[in-house]
Each structure stands twice: as C-alpha cells, then as structure tokens.
Image (spheres, grey):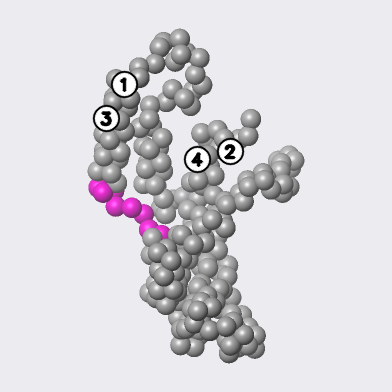
Amino acid sequence: MDPANTPLGRMLLDEISPVVMVLTTPLVDEACQKNGLSFIEMLSPFCVFNNIDVPVRTASDQPYRLQKFKLRLFYASDIRQPDLQVTKERLKEVITKAGEEESLNLHLDAPQPDDLLSRSESEVLPSWFKFFNKELIRTLSFSDHEAFDHPVVCLLVVSSKDDQPVNRFVDLFNTDQLPSLLNDGAMDPKIHKLYLLLHDNQDAPPEKLLISDTEVYPVVNGMD
C-alpha cells in the first residue's frame, strides 16, 4: 500500500512537508489578481510532485525512494503562531459542525454492525476527527519549540513594472517585513533565497525588459 494513501502519510505530506516563505511586492499581487488568484494560488499546482523516483539517504542508511513530494507556500506575514483563544473557538466550531453532519448521515443511512466490523480503521473514524486533527496541528504551527513549519527557503518575487526591480529584492528582505521568529533568532537567519522576476506579456514583450545579468548578480550575491 502506498504510504501516501494512509492517514499518517497524507498528514505528513500535507502538514509536515517543507515550507517556502514568499515575499511579494504590491505590483506582483496586482498582476496575479487579474486572474482572480493570489501569487501562492498560482504557484501551488507546481509544488506537488507525483510519480517521481528519487533516492533518499536516511539516518540509518536504509535505502528509500521518494515517490511523492510537496512544498507548502506561506506569505511571510502568515508565518506566525495562531492566537490560542481564536484557535480554541475554531476547534469547537469544527467539532460541532462535523458532529451535526455525522448525526444527519447516520440518521439517513445507518450502517449495519457487520458492515462496521469489516471496515478499515480509517473508515470508522468519526468525521470530525480528520478536521479536528488538521486544526490541532495548525495550533502548533510556527511555534518557537518546533521547526516543522520553519521555512527552508525564501522566495522573493518582484514585478518587472516595479521601479528599479533589482533593488526591490533588497527592500523585500527587510526586517520590518520578516516574521518575528526570524528576527528573534528562532529561525535560521541565513535562510536560502530564490529570486523571481514576474512579467506580464500584456505589458510588454519579454525582450523589452532592460535588466541585465550584471545588474542582478551584485545585488543577489550581496544579499546571500
């Protein structure tokens, strides 16, 4: 059985896969909104990798091949621990709503005892458990004492319409915009950075961009 199809496998893939921190300029957000999407929503379909076959070196040197992989994208402004009181209320809502739906389903189509006994463990879990588990994991996200949600890379995105777009990369990675976890030292301050220049062909053909490699390299190398 594919581990990714088990409840634990799906949770690991959805909740504990590597995190990418995204920083964008307002003009990038404006360009993406032309399609009714955020930048993260546009990029997310390209962050799921299925049917791959990549060898992985484990701590015990046991052979293992990665069949699926996923990246989770978060804006820097969202990389913070949720408010505890708000989270408690959210958990109550999730359980109450799921419980009401479960009661309705049981009333409409009550399963027979023999049918319940023949089902797998994942099939007999109450419907609220999956939602509760997901929300419970989120309450622990971006905390000081765990690093599952700490970003492994930072993606800086600038629009070709930005004034001096190369210099905007420097402006983006400013302590005023970075998560407190990074500024306080809980996250690695030497996070690896990737740089993306977003261009809309409706504005001008790509060959009209007046940005050379000699402009980009000094700025990028200075930030790293």
Dot 1: element? helix
* Rendered residue at 67%/45% (across/down): 51
Specify the segment rendered in magenta: 79-86
What label does residue 108 carry, if any?
1
Q: Are marks 1 and 4 in contact (CB under 8 Å)?
A: no
| Quadrant in the picture for the C terminus | bottom right
Dot 2 surroundings within 10 Å: few (below 14), some, or many (20 or more)?
A: some
Tell me where residue 116 appears, x and y as whole percent: 44, 15
Q: Is residue 211 above or below residue 50?
A: below
Q: Main secondary structure of the magenta part?
A: loop
Kindly tell me whether residue 131 is visible in this rendering: yes
Dot 3 surroundings within 10 Å: few (below 14), some, or many (20 or more)?
A: few
- What residue is disc 2 on? 4
Amino acid type of the residue tagged 1 in the rendering? Leu
Quadrant of residue 197 in the image? bottom right
Quadrant of residue 9 in the image? top right
Tell me where residue 29 appears, x and y as whole percent: 41, 71
* Rendered residue at 46%/60% (across/down): 41
Dot 1 surroundings within 10 Å: few (below 14), some, or many (20 or more)?
A: few
- What residue is disc 4 on? 11
Dot 3: element? helix
- Is residue 72 on the magenta stretch? no
Observer-nearest of 127 and 187: 127
Determine the CA span between mark 2 and mark 4: 9 Å
> Mark 3 or 2 closer to N-term?
2
